[in-house]
Image (cartoon, helix red, strand yellow):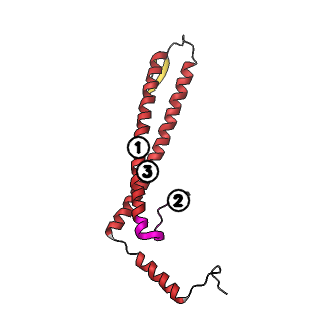
């Protein structure tokens, strides 16, 4: 009885499979360039997604600060606002305006980053099609979720 999970291969079939696998291993310089480009862009897209998440957290913090300021009494004297390493005190209205400007700036940055992720995603998709067309199952271009 066969010991390979119920499948039995004839010697000719096994030889054909080995021959096919050997033929598919031929990697040209252009193929290697595409594989390197795929790896570089995969790494870049991961970095950009992490940066987007960081900016979204910053945006949420600014939105929370805006909510907190709206709950303050109008007679609150001055509100400290951090710029770099120092805190500068401003009126409630001035602080609100600064927070809104910072939120607008962050939203624009997030939008630009998401656009770059989309462009890189398209490049990765095109490279996947080309590489899978040539190498089939002999190449794995799927991200490890470990």
Between 45 and 134, the one nearer to me in the picture: 134
**Rendered position, 59 above or below 75:** below
Q: Furthest-top residue in view?
A: 75
Tell me the tag on residue 45. 3
Q: Residue furthest bottom?
A: 11
* Quadrant of the rendering where the C terminus is positioned: bottom right
Number of numbered discs overlaid on the protein picture? 3
The span from disc 1 to disc 2 (Cα, nearest Å) is: 24 Å
- Measuring from the top left, give residue 75's x and y in whole percent: 54, 10
Report the residue marked by disc 1: 115
Residue at numbered disc 2: 144
Q: Residues within 10 Å of mark 3 (few under 14, many from 20)?
A: many
Which numbered disc, 1 or 2, marks the residue closer to the eye?
Answer: 1
The quarter holding residue 85 reads top left
**Helix, strand or loop at disc 1?**
helix
Residue 136 counted in the magenta span: yes
Instruction: Give the vertical position of 55 relative to 12 (above or below).
Output: above
């Amino acid at each position: 009885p066969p010991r390979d999970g119920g499948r039995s291969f004839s010697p000719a079939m096994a030889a054909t499979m080995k021959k096919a696998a050997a033929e598919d291993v031929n990697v040209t310089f252009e193929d290697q360039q595409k594989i390197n480009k795929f790896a570089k862009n995969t790494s870049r897209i991961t970095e950009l997604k992490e940066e987007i998440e960081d900016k979204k957290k910053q945006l949420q913090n600014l939105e929370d600060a805006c909510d907190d300021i709206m709950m303050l009494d109008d007679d609150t004297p001055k509100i400290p606002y951090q710029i770099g390493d120092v805190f500068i005190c401003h009126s409630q209205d001035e602080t609100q305006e600064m927070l809104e400007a910072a939120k607008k700036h962050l939203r624009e940055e997030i939008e630009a980053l998401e656009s770059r992720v989309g462009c890189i995603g398209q490049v990765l998709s095109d490279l996947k099609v080309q590489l899978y067309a040539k190498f089939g199952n002999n190449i794995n271009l799927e991200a490890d979720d470990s």
